[in-house]
Amino acid sequence: MPIADTKVTPYYAVIFTSTRTEGDNGYGEMAQTMAALAAQQPGFLGVESAREELGITVSYWESLDAIAAWKRNSEHLIAQKLGRSQWYASYKTRICKVERDYDFSAV
């Protein structure tokens, strides 16, 4: 997964940190579906994700309104419910305003 191209600051980051329950239970397929769906939402800028024992997914958005609309998306609401009942032992969501960013690439 490449580093998200977040364009011009300021923008917002939603940091979703989680621990999983045992087994996949359809998680992998739903995660791919949600990533594709999020990418179609107005105001979506990109996503970065990593998982070992602790999973961290950071999605980037143009505005708080875009984040709120994503949270209310009907398919995303189903995934949230399944997450609480089947996939996550615990999670925390943080929403942050990104004031600046900078990068480096040796390529």
Image: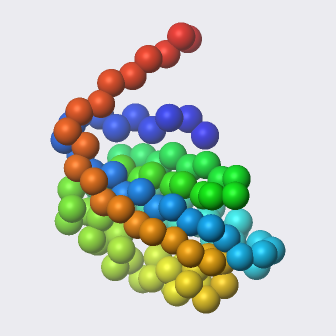
Q: Eyeballing the image, is 97 above or below 67?
A: above
Residue 96 location (% of width, % of height): 27, 54
In terms of depth relative to the viewer, which is nearer, 22 or 105? Answer: 22
Residue 47 seen: yes
- The residue depicted at 20 percent of the width and 65 percent of the height is 65
The answer, for residue 75, to whether it is visible in the render is no
Q: Left of 101 or right of it: where is 50?
A: right
- Which quadrant would the N terminus be assigned to in this image? top right
Coordinates of residue 31 in the picture (x, y in percent): 61, 65
Which image quarter: residue 68? bottom left
Q: Is residue 93 left or right of residue 9?
A: right
Q: Position of residue 56 (x, y in %)?
A: 54, 55
Up the image or down, 82 lies above or below 6; here it is below
Identify which residue, 26 or 16, lies in the foreground: 16
- In the rendered view, tell whether residue 55 sits above or below residue 49: below
Counting every numbered tag in the picture gives: 0
Position of residue 66 relative to residue 2, above or below, is below
Residue visible at 71% across and 66% down? 28
Q: Residue at x 78, y 75 (%)?
A: 22
**Quadrant in the picture for the C terminus:** top right
Left or right of residue 23: residue 40: left
View extreme (right): residue: 23
The type of colouring in the image is rainbow
Left or right relative to 24: residue 61? left
Q: Residue at x 30, y 60 (%)?
A: 95
